[in-house]
Amino acid sequence: MSQKIRLGVIFGGRSGEHEVSLMSARSVLSVLDAQKYEIIPIGVTRTGTWVCGEDVLGALENGREDQLSTAVLVPEPGFATLYRIENGAMTQVSALDVLFPVMHGSFGEDGTLQGLLELADLAYVGAGVLASSVAMDKALFKDVMRANGLPVVNSLVITRRQIESDMDQILSRCEALGPYPLFTKPANLGSSVGITKCRNRSDLYEGLQEAARFDRRILVEQGVLNVREIEVSVLGNHQPQASLPGEVVPGDDFYTYNAKYFNPNSILSVPARLPESLIEHIRQLAVSAFEAIDCAGMARVDFLMDGQTGQVYIGELNTIPGFTQISMYPKLWEATGIAYQSLLDRLIELALERKMDRDHTERHYRRGG
């Protein structure tokens, strides 16, 4: 293509991972090749308003959203264009060829944004509506893994209403999973927001309350003894490939939000020191999980491994993994042989490829014709 690809990069969002999204976006925007792409930054405020203007990212980072204009994407085929709204009038900002969501958590990674982009008939980086929504809900994701014979830890799902109505019964149900430690987490959030490691009933009580702040569905999981946290990046559409695995050695008690983004004592070992046979097993599991939910483009698959027995469990799959300078997704591909900038180029190519595939689907049916 001789013309530059008109690439929208959207970030921020109405999510507990708003700040993480901004960090990822800064890394992505600093690396994208301006010779290949006409880059159109699109911000989403904490209240969910789309915005555009000069230095959108900086404005969101510094709380200067009032200096930006409201933006909108019309959810109708043939109008893959970003518009600015000022004084009640819409003016065109730019037509778009592809959108790169650098959005983590609710309303960005859960299928809602992807649904809008499908309605607009716009190419976009990453998984579609189905895979995004299934992967975002950790409880549903585990059910799909079990249905496909893939290994996951024992867990149960409870609701905020159940916690509010009969906490004592819920505590007993959770403890029936197995011995402490147990983990409580919001079913639909990432970056370890709202997760608590519970060593006793008092911790469990507080952990359930904490998780219920962020979601109406709460996942309770049995902890893994001697745990090692392994991560694998996956790339592709029809023939996905898995990277070498990496290992996370958290600076905190487990891989908390602080350990992921701020604690300098957290160590990312790339590649992970594992036997070759186990490396291949984990890579195969990552691809199997990716395919089981009909994922596309990219994902990071997180594993829990018993350090003594070597038993591996699929923890979760992130359809829009972090892209900060310390994020595992690009680091793992760099260790496997794909540099950061080339990785972004490949993801955009996969988005356009998937749009071409969607365009082959017939949308009309005439009986007898």
Image (cartoon, rainbow, N blue to C red):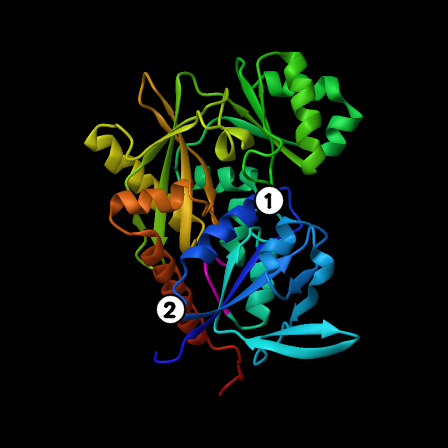
Can residue 253 be spotted in the picture? yes
The kind of residue tagged 2 is Glu
Relative to 220, is 242 on the left or the right?
A: left
Instruction: Report the disc number at residue 353.
Output: 2
Residue 150 picture location, percent across and down = 39, 37
The disc labelled 1 sits on which kind of residue?
Glu
**Vertical side of 258 occupied by 306: above or below:** above
Magenta stretch: dominant SS?
loop
Tag 1 and tag 2, C-beta contact below 8 Å:
no
**Residue 19 disc label:** 1
Name the residue at 65% across, 23% down.
207
Secondary structure beneath dot 1 equals helix
Locate residue 314, reporting x and y percent: 41, 34
Q: Quadrant of residue 69?
A: bottom right
Taking the magenta stretch, the answer to whether it contains residue 125 is yes
| The magenta stretch spans residue 156 | no
Q: Does 238 sit above or below residue 221?
A: below
Tell me: 107 left or right of 353: right
Residue 159 seen in the figure: no
Q: Residue at x 30, y 46 (%)?
A: 334
Whichever of labels 1 and 2 marks the residue nearer the N terminus, that label is 1
Left or right: where does residue 276 sit relative to residue 352?
left
Give the secondary structure at mark 2.
Answer: helix
Going 70% across and 54% down the picture, which residue do you hit? 64
Residue 55 x, y percent position in the rendering: 59, 61
Stretch of the chain drawn in magenta: 123-128
